[in-house]
Amino acid sequence: MANTIFTKQYSDNILYNALVPLYHVCLEVFLLLMVLWLIFHQSYNPNETGDLSKEELQALIDEWTPEELVSDVDQNHRALHPRVITSKAQKYISIDNNKCLNLATHNYLNFVGNEIIEKSAIDTIHKYGVGSCGPRGFYGTVDVHLDLENKLAEFMEMEEAVVYSYGFSTIASAIPAYAKRSDVIFVDEKVNFAIQKGLDASRSRLKFFKHNDTNDLESLLLEQAELDKKNPKKANVTRRFLIVEGIYMNTGEICPLPALIELRKKYKLRIFVDESVSFGTLGVTGRGVTEYFDVPKQDVDMIMCSMEWALGTIGGFCVGSSFIVEHQRLSGLGYCFSASLPPLLTVAASKALDIMTKDITIFSDLKDCCELMHSALETINGLKTKSHKHSPVKHLVLSDECVFTIPREEVLYEISNYCIQHGIAVIVPSYLEKVEKFTPTTSIRLTVNNKLSSEEIKQACTVLQEACNALMSH
Amino acid sequence: MLVGGHGESNPNTTWLQSRGLWISYAVGMLTLHLILLSIPLLSVAVAWTLTNIIHNTCHFIFLHILKGAPWIPQDQGDCRVLTHWEQIDYGQQFTVTRKFLTIVPIVLFFLTSFYTRYATGHFIVNFVSMMLVVLPKLPQFHRVRLFGINKY
């Protein structure tokens, strides 16, 4: 039955073809022409601008002045005269054959040179060899990685931790894993270079606020809130991030976390804190800036941290809720595409964490040393510091009112040279001036560790004072 | 899902170039049409119009409404604002894939018109649905959001 209808209707079509309405014939001809136009049209890319005209090309060629491959370098350039270190970078260090008290490298808890940690690392080499032979997702996960992640999550009282193989790339990968092209990031203008690289890679819109200035931040947030109100559809798909450091590597100041958390709640931000310096140094049990301000850790979305400073090993980690942190196992570029942290360094971090859990007196010792150093530094005539008294990183700049016998930009380097010759290692940090967003002011960066005696602190400040006096015009 | 192994940060750009896609596409449509024809209550004309409408609805939804990609592309959210159509061949216009996908609804319209015997009701429905999928495919509408529809 159905079959007869089918054949009937199909055979009737021949009759109906004669009755095609005229408008349909026209339309079909038009569409056929369009098909031909499509088939024979040349392919092109709308994103590319057309070829340059001859004049434009010539103008570009004329404008261009070739740069020398190797330009003349000043023979006194500091990079041509590196300092040679012939010992471990522990409490005492030998620089160019001067035995110095080490106030230059970041070793806040003296885990570099700790024999228990060294021994555990060496034992691990005998068991696992030196490398892990692959990224975490590709034969590179060893039991010690999982152990360390559990320990870190437990120590930081967060749900999950993820371990990276390099401190810098921890921070530079974690940020672009979440912040994407259409998002907005509010960020302190003095953040360290790793964060800046993460910001670059995120391709997000950046809003820099003045260093530790919550009023400036709030005005930027209000501006954004106005924009969001005008275009709620866009606001719905725009994420707003706030990125700060616990203790700023470039200034030694502590971020005003409670105020930032208030703003986070008020303006619905996602806050990431870089705790590279504050981890293991702030708080009674060394759990960082959240413990220092007694802020619940759940109020911070993610904590990123390098293990290269306080923990004295290599690598870095991020902690947060599983929902947030788990995302990096597929989206953190440094996690997915780098070989995992060598087991010996993983075990060193684990061991250091054990020590931190067992013996909390190291944190009070460090705090005392920081305070002592701070009050001693404040007495130096010619130098001043804006760093926080509880920060193990102290930045010293020249006092405005002092007059020196040599150009001001040279003074700090000369002070550093003088100190190294007189047994105190302090340095002037180098920055990539053309690459930094806001190049930090030149300063002497001094680091404190928990085993400094009050005599050593006094001695360091005496040498600094002598150096200043030698360069000051009276 | 993390995609990789074929050198594309976003496979949406190239998967439609795959070998055998055109024949699979034709077989898929034929199957759909035969299924509709085999339903006793539907006349041939209705079956053709339904084929056309279903095909064009799929085009409209999957190529012109849905944006982004179903996996995590390593492009920092580049494709988040682009429909699948705009991602094809990284936005290159008049490529073979694009030509194929534009011509298919037009040819389908010819066939449907023929088998519906140019009935006015069928014509209006089929013509509108064809225009809705052919117009957004034109290069003039690349990254254009008329009246801000589907902009964010």
Image (cartoon, coloured by chain):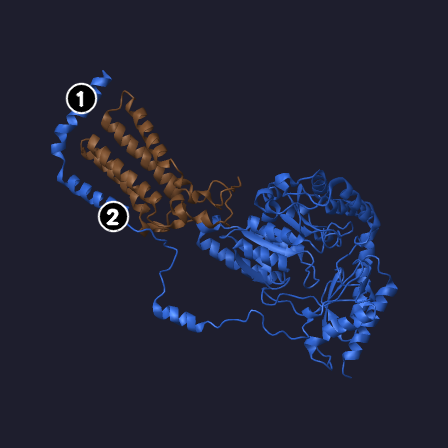
Mark 2, secondary structure of its residue: helix
**On residue A8, which mark appears?**
1
The answer as to whether the residues below labels 2 and 1 share one chain is yes
- The image quarter in which residue A408 lies: bottom right
- Identified by mark 1, the residue type is Lys
In three-dimensional space, the C-alpha distance between marks 2 and 1, rounded to whole angstroms, equals: 37 Å
* Residue that appears at 59% across and 59% down: A196
> What is the letter of the brown chain?
B
Q: Which residue is mark 2?
A: A37
* Residue that appears at 30% across and 25% down: B34
Q: Is residue B53 above or below residue A123?
A: above
**Circle 1 residues within 10 Å: few <14, some 14–19, many ≥20:** few
For chain A, give the colour: blue
**On residue A355, which mark appears?**
none
Q: Where the N terminus of chain A falls, by quadrant?
A: top left
* Residue that appears at 41% across and 47% down: B87
Single out the residue that lies furthest toward the bottom.
Answer: A474
User: Tags 2 and 1 in contact by the CB under 8 Å rule?
Assistant: no
N-terminal of the pair, mark 2 or mark 1, is 1
Single out the residue that lies furthest toward the top.
Answer: A1
Q: Is residue B91 above or below residue A58?
A: above
**Circle 2 residues within 10 Å: few <14, some 14–19, many ≥20:** few
Q: Is residue A61 left or right of residue A448?
A: left
Q: Position of residue B83 (x, y in %)?
A: 40, 45
